[in-house]
Amino acid sequence: MTRTQLKEHPYRPHLAVIKEIIQETPTIRTFRLTWKDPAVSAHFSFQPGQVGQLSAFGVGESTFVINSPPTRREYLQFSVMRTGEVTRALHQLNVGDTVGVRAPLGNSFPYTSMKGRDILFIGGGIGMAPLRTLLLTMIDNRADFGDITVIYGARSPEDLCYRYEFDAWRAARVNLVLTVDREFPGWTERVGFVPTILAEEAPNPYNRVAITCGPPIMIKFVLAGLRELGYEDDQIYTTLERRMKCGIGLCGRCNIGGTYVCVDGPVFSGTALRAMPPEL
Ligand SMILES: Cc1cc2nc3c(=O)[nH]c(=O)nc-3n(C[C@H](O)[C@H](O)[C@H](O)COP(=O)(O)OP(=O)(O)OC[C@H]3O[C@@H](n4cnc5c(N)ncnc54)[C@H](O)[C@@H]3O)c2cc1C
Ligand code: FES
């Protein structure tokens, strides 16, 4: 996994303009941004899994994963769930408004080491955001990967993000398994919690990498489920959320024991998770 830090002016955001807003679910909006400064546009690069600090001016800054893939550079995408002050302020912005972006921050998925292998994504709710970055990068290099299976769940059909591109994922030979927590009128896909669907699908661990992100309780049961299916710790990756402030390893806000999620993460292997304190 790579570990990067901004080299210059680490607290000064670059300015970006909102080009498009997509209402994903009742509480999640996706923002498609372009850089104001053409020099930033020309030089900005990142890896799947890395995050950015988005600022709503006069309100504050919060952490969000970059969920457009590095293979598609026409805009930079963030999906924001409304939970508190900063996210509420971001949701009030309109197309044409300006935000601040400090990015890329944190480490990334070990993309290169995943080439030649089968892939299993397991996402819950807004946890699909970091998985989408990696999934689309793989779709754009489809020949480099074997089977790609995505198990994605949410509370209800309207809580699933990125519904408008599910057909394109399937067209790229992605085995997409969708689930919601209970029956809904008109819902024809799976019903049940994500860990239950994982156990039912039971994707073979041979030469496969599993990547999961979602609510902590889902991750806990998914990790147990993967180990039950025979996945070894070094075949599993997840991303952790810890409140961040500086995002560059200086303020001590995001640590788990001696691990700083902002620079040592947010991507962690199952092996790294085992070495962390039991508070997880
Ligand atoms: C590495 C990383 C990646 C993230 N990616 C995304 C993303 O792609 N999309 C997205 O919508 N959110 C993401 N988050 C969470 C996001 O940063 C928080 O929801 C946001 O900071 C809340 O800010 P706020 O001012 O609106 O809410 P606040 O007023 O600060 O908090 C509102 C509520 O949310 C809880 N909360 C705030 N921050 C976090 C957090 N980091 N983890 C768990 N609970 C939190 C608070 O405890 C409180 O209950 C990510 C967080 C991290 C650390
Ligand atoms: S957010 Fe400051 S050290 Fe991680």
Image (tube, rainbow, N blue to C red):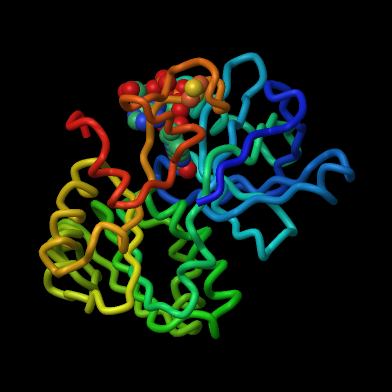
Q: Position of residue 63 (x, y in %)?
A: 51, 32
Judge by depth and name the residue closer to the eye, 234 or 199.
234
Q: Would residue 32 be found to the left or right of residue 190 on screen?
A: right
Residue at 71% in and 51% down: 45
Residue 233 image point, x, y percent: 25, 57
**Measured along the vertical axis of the image, is residue 189 above or below residue 245?**
below
Q: Examine the rendering and report whether any part of residue 121 can be seen.
A: yes
Q: Is residue 82 visible?
A: no
Residue at the image position 41 percent from the left and 79 percent from the top: 174
User: Looking at the image, which residue is at 69% across and 25% down?
Assistant: 10
Q: Farthest residue in the right direction? A: 38
Q: Quadrant of the C terminus?
A: top left
Query: Nearest the camera: 188 or 143?
Result: 143
Count the marks. Answer: 0
Spot occupied by residue 38 in the image (x, y as percentages of width and height) = 89, 45
Q: Is residue 226 left or right of residue 32?
A: left
Name the residue nearer the viewer: 71 or 251.
Answer: 251
114 relative position to 250: left or right: left
Residue 115 lies, in percent from the top left, at: 49, 74
Q: Is residue 219 above or below residue 87?
A: below
Quarter of the picture for ligand 1? Answer: top left
